[in-house]
Amino acid sequence: MEDRRARIGLAIVTFVVATSFGAHVAVPLPWTPVPMTLQPLFVILAGAVLGPRLGAAAMATYLAVGMGGAPVFSQGHAGIGWLLGPTGGYLISYPAAAYVSGLLAGKASSSALRLFGALSAGMLVIYVGGTAQLAFLTQLDLRAVMALSVLPFLGGDLTKVLIGVFVAKRVRPTSLARL
């Protein structure tokens, strides 16, 4: 039992660290307050690799670490105030996105097509969270908010989903069996 708990704890910490690393790989875009980061890749992978509950727990832990003051959000930011800003909706959606990705990914033997759909659905959850908060903060119409919160990221996020499918197909059979 202790060995299982240790494996689960290590898996959660691994995704907290990976997501933190992904936040520091940030490319600011001059026309939007939202930078392009690698965080979404690790969010959807957390769900697919750890399963819905543990993936969501990893992302909730990531948020708690950042709210506690550790510089784990994009470009080294931290604190609860960051969750109230233009990128906060994306961040707040991470546990739900990991849960959805994990739930829809299904068994370790799931097909690449199923994984693609599951990871895409997780990405959609992130978009909904980010767009909702940005719309609330800017009071812009939906078309303008989508131009700031979704459209600049579609190509990069499709690439992240494809990378996620590739990684998950190789990691899931052993990781899900061991947790």
Image (tube, grey):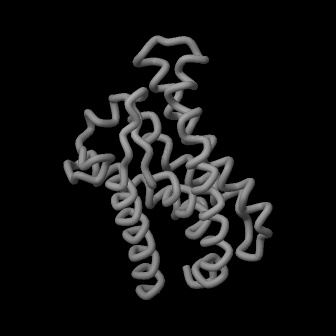
**Residue at coordinates 39% horizontally, 35% vertically from top-left?**
88
Say how many tags the image has. Answer: 0
Q: Residue furthest front?
A: 30
x then y, percent, for residue 52 = 60, 60
* Image-quadrant location for residue 14: bottom left
x then y, percent, for residue 6 = 40, 81
* Image-quadrant location for residue 21: bottom left
x then y, percent, for residue 176 = 61, 77
**Residue at coordinates 32% horizontally, 54% vertically from top-left?**
24
Give the position of the C terminus as an image quadrant. Answer: bottom right
x then y, percent, for residue 117 = 74, 54
**Residue at coordinates 65% horizontally, 60% vertically from top-left?**
162
- Where is 177 relative to 157, above or below? below
Q: Is residue 173 left or right of residue 9?
A: right
**Residue at coordinates 54% horizontally, 40% vertically from top-left?**
153
Q: Residue furthest left?
A: 69
- Where is 174 relative to 34, above or below? below
Q: Is residue 60 left or right of residue 107?
A: left
